Image: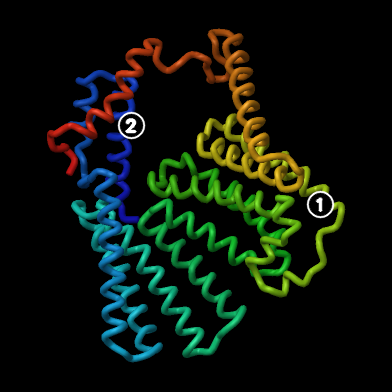
Amino acid sequence: MKRAWIEAERVEEVRGAAHGWKRGGAIGAGTFEEILRRYPEPRALPAPLWRVLVFVFVSLALLLLLGAFVFGARGGVRTATALLFVFGAASLVATEAQENSPRLALRGGAGATCLWGIVFFLGGLFLLLEETLKVRGEDGVTILVVASLALWTLAAWRWGSPAWAGFAGVSLFLVLARAPLARLLWIVGGVALTFVFERVLDRPSWSPSHRRGAAVLVAAGLLGVYAAVNLYSLDHRLVETLGRSAGLDSPGPRVSERIESTVLTALFPLAVVAWGIRSRRVFVLDTGLVLTALSLLTFRVYVPIATWLVLALAGAALVLLALLVNRWLARGEGRERNGFTADPLFGDERRLRALELVPVVAAHAPESRTQV
């Protein structure tokens, strides 16, 4: 990323934090205005709905324009391949131009052109391998997923979108699935991905968007490890299904492997939840809760019990756990333990309810927004 983009992101992060402090009552109106004065908005920041609409309209325009050129040229597969490469390159150039413009960088168009630029390029590469170079079957798919990994990684590093980092993580596991000992590589790769990027989550030299991308890759690493150790995945050879078809001919899991997988299916989500609590990282805790839900669904597959009963028991367990944690915190000195407190954020519940109405009132206010 360019230095100007990183500086703009850091200013936007400070302004966003100031809005949160003001909503929470940590700073007054005077302090809030002073922060906004010292850190002026470097880029136009539209409303989220506007960004979604721009993304959709730009996507439709690109697809319709490509379709018009493909059907108008009538040159067969070679022409379609060339057009896909040309449109892919043009879309990526358009992404760079929009990111360089403070008025266009955050409007949603850059995300659309980057997404479809990479999709067009991968589509052109697929046609080139299949129809021109005659590289078909497993070798062609391997080249395609490696190219996907390279493109999404470069996009995440250049433009800093966490979504591109997520696509790069998915591509990495697809590449590992095509190698021998794919399940073991998923475990090793997931652990490496988690611990490598966990170390940079708070690194000041990284831009805010790169740190968010690192958080996505940490979650992707945890999900990849869980997918490899999950009992249902082991029994149905899900990892091997994503790789080469020859992997499906291997013998089924041994009894010892199923026992180990059963234990890990139960304990791994709890370990992730514990890590999230200890590290105070909300996204790790959320990932652990998602893995816990997946383990409950796995339990439902192997144990003939009604789904409603599983959900009811899970809900009751969460409520009981919340009550026990609140009681444990309340009995600590100063009603807190290790920085966790049982007290609500606001002592005045009426003030909290009033703050909850602020975004609703702002969303329906007739006046124009200051951020366009």
Q: What residue do we see at 59% from left, 61% from top?
A: 173
Q: In the image, what residue occupies the spot 60% across and 49% down?
A: 223
- Three-letter code for the amino acid on which mark 1 is drawn: Arg
Q: Would you name the residue on which mark 1 appears? A: 258
Residue under pointer 2:
17
Figure colour scheme: rainbow
Look at the image and tell me whether residue 4 can be seen.
Answer: no
Farthest residue in the left direction?
367
Tell me how far mark 1 sits from mark 2, CA to CA: 47 Å
Q: The disc labelled 2 sits on which kind of residue?
A: Ala
Could you tell me which residue is drawn at 65 percent across and 53 percent down? 227
Q: Quadrant of the C terminus?
A: top left
Q: Position of residue 80 (x, y in %)?
A: 36, 84
Label 1–label 2 contact, CB within 8 A: no
- SS for tag 1? helix
From the image, which quarter does the N terminus lie in? bottom left
How packed mark 1 is, by other alpha carbons closer than 10 Å (few <14, some 14-19, many 20 or more), is some
Between disc 1 and disc 2, the foreground one is 1
Q: Is residue 358 visible?
A: yes
Does residue 185 lie above or below 65 as drawn? above
- Among the 4 quarters of the image, the one containing residue 2: bottom left
Q: Which mark is residue 171?
A: none
Q: What x and y, as percent, mark residue 342? A: 53, 15
**Residue 277 vs residue 354, the one in the foreground:** 354
